Image: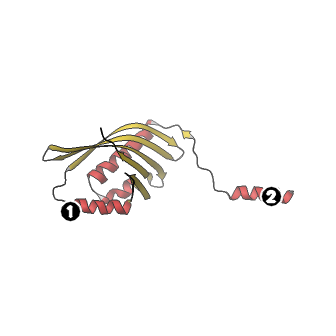
Amino acid sequence: MKKAILFLLILGACQAPQADNKQAPITEAEKQIAKDLVQGAFDHLWAGVDSTKINTYHTEDFIILEQGVIWDNDRIKKFMRNQLKRTKRPKRTNRMEYISIEKYGESMQIAYFNFAEFTKNDSIVGNAKWLESALAVNTKVGWRLKMMHSTGVKD
């Protein structure tokens, strides 16, 4: 009996710690960090097409699930290189409407609508809308996006 109890104690000590899945209080400052992270990623990466900023906003293992396709940082860099080759690329401006921002331990779950306006020569040439979510994690270098999900919305 003692051996069985000792075995169970050792087994329990060897198991991976459970993730903190309880919703934690979130401060207004943390909500602003989440908003700045999402907005900054879209302003600098998707609109600004600046691959040097990826590590400012994404974890190394970041993925985005976009309309059934998985994008990682390497695929995003390739997309950006192709965008920069386009000489008549429209300017992209993003505006977010946040649905919720919740904190769970050292992560934040962000849900929002993303509205993009595309302009050329000061004329609107297109609009797009997505329903998106993001997971931000607190890393050694600050909050970073680890995962996003994006679904196009037709009005």
Residue 136 visible at all: yes
Quarter where residue 33 is shown: top left
Of the pair 63 and 29, the residue shown nearer to us: 63
Residue at point 63% right, 56% down?
Answer: 16
Residue at point 42% right, 41% down?
Answer: 111
With 78 as the anchor, is 123 left or right in this view?
Answer: left
Quarter where residue 69 is shown: bottom left
Vertical placement of residue 90 versus 113, above or below: below
Of the pair 21 and 131, the residue shown nearer to us: 131
With 15 as the anchor, is 91 left or right in this view?
Answer: left
Question: Marks 1/2: CA distance?
Answer: 65 Å
The residue type indicated by label 1 comes to Lys
Tag in front: 1 or 2? 1
Helix, strand, or loop for circle 1? Answer: helix
Identify the mark nearer the N-term, 1 or 2: 2
The residue that disc 1 covers is 85
The residue that disc 2 covers is 6
Whole-percent x, y for residue 43 in the image: 29, 48
The residue type indicated by label 2 comes to Leu
Residue 43 circle label: none
Whole-percent x, y for residue 82 in the image: 25, 62
Name the quadrant of the N terminus.
Answer: bottom right
How many other residues sit within 10 Å of disc 2, few (<14), some (14-19) or many (≥20)?
Answer: few
Residue at point 28% right, 59% down?
Answer: 80
Helix, strand, or loop for circle 2? Answer: helix
Q: Which residue is most to the right?
A: 1
